[in-house]
Image (tube, helix red, strand yellow):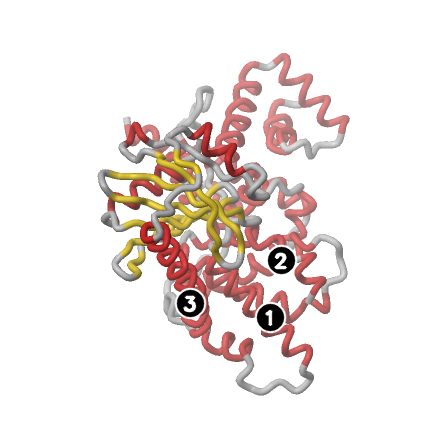
Amino acid sequence: MERFTEFVLPYLDAAHNLARYLMRDAYEAEDAVQEAFLRAIRHFGGFRGVDGRAWLLSIVRNACFTQLRRQRSGGEKVEFDEEIHSHEVELSAPEADLANTIAAESVRAGLSQLAVEFREVLVLRELEGLSYKEIAQVIGVPMGTVMSRLARGRKQLLLVLGANAKEND
Amino acid sequence: MEHQEVIDRLSPFLDDELDPVASREVERHLESCPPCRAGFERQRNLSESLQRDLEYHRAPDMLRERVMRDLRAAGRRDAAPAPPCGSAVALAERGRGRVRGGGGAWIAAMQWRGSGDDAIAREVVSGHIRSLMANHLADVASTDQHTVKPWFAGKLDFSPPVTDFAAAEYPLTGGRLDYLQGHPVAALVYMHRKHVINVFVWPVAGAREQLAPPVTERGYHVIHAAHAGMSYWVVSDLNAQELAAFVRLLTAPA
């Protein structure tokens, strides 16, 4: 367990931060993180790499998505589709003009309106500072997908912020 | 590079994830194309805003303790090849109900955590009472933070933050050395109206920002907070609201 303490435990904060943004609920996030750590402890024997953060975060996001799917079942089941989800927002809304600084509150609110798949890449990139390669490892998709998902996520967040700003006028 | 190609590459360009050739092409295009440059500025501002304005949610202490318990339990299980079926991990895994906070592990962690904090709260109140009874409030009696702070130097292996809040009617009146949890700690003394407030401070590695709700112990209110690498235990017979207001002052970002 000493190796676990050295390679994985330091990323508990990162794990919690990611879970918090995916679940959008403090209790759910803590549950998901504990669940993920139990899995991580159990499977640590299979950890061969040096990047404990990407390894842990992939377990955390899987725990979160399992929990989210459980919540959704019962309701209608919508699989994530990059194309469909990129057009959810009314495209007539102008992108938010962020030439000047934007209110912190509206950025937080805007992010929470995005599909969880977009929140995920944005948090991993902007808050965790991961490279595309690391993000690809965490979420288990090719790097090209990371690139397009981030671009779409940003585009969509700008549209959401623009639409919100228009509403508040 | 065509217009649309550039637009498609703004996001990876921003993230410095383009190969050098493509990166130079985007750069060159941006120099000569105001609309694309405006698009890029929007993306860059968004990115800066996300990094600056989104909260980084560090793991709460209670979660850390839940995880540490699981880890210790797994360590014990490794040490004993044939674990009893009621081992802590098994219990925790079974008890992790989906009801909020209803999981057995969560409750167990809370009690475990609670007992540790209770013990400190009791010690803190004892320290507070001792300081009043023995008429030993301060080793250095001064309302000047620039006198109190240096006094601790050489007596402790850390430098406690010392600020006078006289303007907010919580004047500093002195400081002394005290002993908590087997360690020497700094005790700062403040007054509010006629009430003495003792603030026990010591450093904690990797502490997460925290402000716990007031607890009552032998008629005294005790509030625990963690801020900027320091653990604070604040005790007084002052009412809980005013004491909480004081702790917020104490732990406000400089």
What's the residue at 53%, 54% (across, down)? B183
Relative to B20, residue A156 above or below: below
What's the residue at 67%, 69% (across, down)? A43
Q: Are marks 2 and 3 in contact (CB under 8 Å)?
A: no
Residue found at the very far front of the displayed protein = B134
Residue that carries the numbered disc 3 in the rendered image: B115
Helix, strand, or loop for circle 1?
helix
Q: Which mark is residue B72?
A: 1
In front: label 3 or label 1? 3
Chain containing the residue with disc 2: A
Instruction: Give the mark nearest the N terminus, 3 or 1.
Output: 1
Chain containing the residue with disc 1: B
Q: Quadrant of residue A96?
A: top left
**Label 2 neighbourhood size at 10 Å, few (<14), some (14-19), many (20+)?**
many
Q: Which mark is residue B206?
A: none
The amino acid type, in three-letter code, at marker 1 is: Arg
**Label 1 neighbourhood size at 10 Å, few (<14), some (14-19), many (20+)?**
some
Q: Relative to B84, is A69 on the left or the right?
A: left
Q: Position of residue A97 (x, y in %)?
A: 43, 23
Residue that carries the numbered disc 2 in the rendered image: A9
In front: label 2 or label 1? 1
Helix, strand, or loop for circle 3?
helix
The amino acid type, in three-letter code, at marker 2 is: Leu
